Image (cartoon, helix red, strand yellow):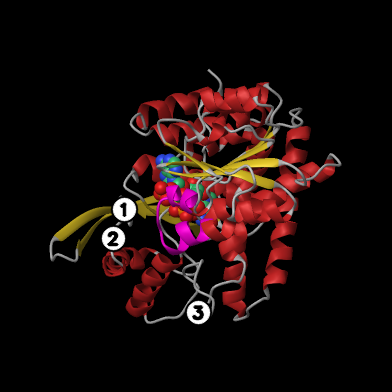
Amino acid sequence: MSYVDNIIAGIEKKDAGQPEFLQASKEVLESLRIIADRDSVYEKVGLLERLVEPERIIVFRIPWVDDSGKVQVNRGYRVQYNSAIGPYKGGIRFHPSVNLSIMKFLAFEQTFKNSLTGLPMGGGKGGADFDPKGKSDNEVMRFCQSFINELYRHIGPDTDVPAGDIGVGAREVGFMYGQYKRLVNNFTGTFTGKGIGWGGSLGRTEATGYGLVYIVEEYLNKKGDSFKGKKVTISGSGNVAIFAAQKAASFGATVIAMSDSNGYICHKAGINLDTMKDIKLVKRERISKYVEVHKDAVYTETGKGRVWDVACDIALPCATQNELLLEDAKKLADNNCKIVGEGANMPTTLEATELLLSKGVAFFPGKAANAGGVSTSGLEMSQNSARLSWPFEEVDAKLKNIMAGIFRSMDDAAREYGKEGNFIVGANIAGFKKVAKAMMDQGVV
Ligand code: NDP
């Protein structure tokens, strides 16, 4: 049995009840097969065994009182996955689906993503099985405060720096940071995604979606092409989806479909982003409201159709994990879609990814394509340390540069290992090499 096969057999046994973690780690391990076969040093120092085991996992109770006076209890997590190249860094997710498998897969992916950015950030992720939907602002605040009452002792500007993710935006980061500051009596850059005026960076809100479009544009430009005139479909209508749509439209593309967990909108004339932002980011309503404003748009409920049914040149899954399935991939390829760029983390299943690759679709994995968010978080940390605040244009220019650098790293790594054009292998190898070197330099820790 090869080294990689041994590691896979080990996690299949040990982490059998963690499907998302197994899916993410197997994908990476398969990519690392070439490199592990070529150099026996990794096996000698037990590097992969260490890599599939998080450094620390914190699981905790979050009691809080709802508006009717009833005590509610949720479960909180922080997975401090790998600190070889910097303090743990990764978002917090509030969603009823949150469990240990999802937290571990996200923290694992984050480790490689952060490495790819070239910034000194380790990998982590956290969250709770709390659903902010339908909760009052006061309930969300009490929940965030209780979450921090435990988490605060495990995080810090040089230890672990959380940020937002699904269900955690500016409002939640504000509530968490406020409670954190109160408990530690210290104004430090322990969170990113903070508000402008209290340590936040301009450009952070837009960064993940913009970064996704920058990396795809970089690829298109290299082929003498661009977003101009392309039809784009995007799943989700949250932070990542909306700003990806905004940047794609500013590059001359037409975004014709977007979704939420209840259904999708198809608007051939191009999605109106002012309406979309008002519905999803301001009023926090269902996407179906869109057709009340734009009568020429069509709404299709989940179960009656999927956003991937809409023919497009470029598809950007920006909602959640495992939302682009084999059938969706077939539909996209049959409809002549040429590019899939993952704004979300692991939105495409392994079978769907393989199908897309086999059909020659250019595929940009999330750990590279959505790294713009954490990159700008890294820039926020730098500004906090220097007590500076850079203008939007400066942050945006740095983001563009970082995304171009990520494209080069994964493109070069894929070429070096004889897998030209396979950005999954390229991203996994490029991200791995830096973390592996740091781990080996630091001994068996
Ligand atoms: P938001 O909470 O802002 O938005 C999530 C969107 O996805 C919403 O439109 C939501 O719909 C939709 N959605 C969630 N679950 C499902 C589902 N099961 N089926 C269909 N739609 C669903 O999250 P973000 O935009 O911040 O994050 C989206 C993805 O991007 C996640 O995978 C996240 O990990 C990843 N990511 C985010 C980064 C960031 O900076 N925010 C950075 C890097 C990655 P509804 O309104 O109905 O809930």
Q: Crowding at label 2, few (<14), some or many (≥20) Cα neighbours within 10 Å?
A: few
**Which of marks 1 and 3 precedes in the sequence?**
1
**Distance between mark 3 and mark 2 Cα atoms:** 25 Å
Q: Nearer the viewer, mark 3 or mark 2?
A: 2
Magenta range:
276-292
Residue 32 location in percent, x, y? 61, 32
Residue 206 or residue 199, whichever sits in front: 206
Q: Are marks 3 and 2 in contact (CB under 8 Å)?
A: no
Q: Say which residue appears at 74% left-offset and 31% top-offset.
A: 417
Q: Does 66 appear above or below 270? A: below
Q: Which residue is mark 1?
A: 131
- Does label 3 point to a residue whose CB lies under 8 Å from ligand 1? no
Name which residue type carries label 3: Trp
Q: Does 77 appear above or below 317? A: below
Prevailing SS of the magenta stretch = helix
**Which of marks 2 and 3 precedes in the sequence?**
2
Left or right of 112, for residue 78:
left
Q: Nearer the viewer, mark 2 or mark 1?
A: 2
Q: Are marks 2 and 1 in contact (CB under 8 Å)?
A: yes
Residue 288: in magenta span = yes
Left or right of 416, for residue 310:
left
Name which residue type carries label 1: Asp
Can the viewer see residue 108?
yes
Q: Nearer the viewer, mark 3 or mark 1?
A: 1
Residue 410 or residue 174, whichever sits in front: 174
Name which residue type carries label 2: Lys
Callout count: 3
Residue 419: in magenta span = no
**Distance between mark 2 and mark 1 Cα atoms:** 8 Å
Q: Does 223 appear above or below 281? A: above
Q: Which residue is mark 3?
A: 198
Residue 142 or residue 154, whichever sits in front: 142
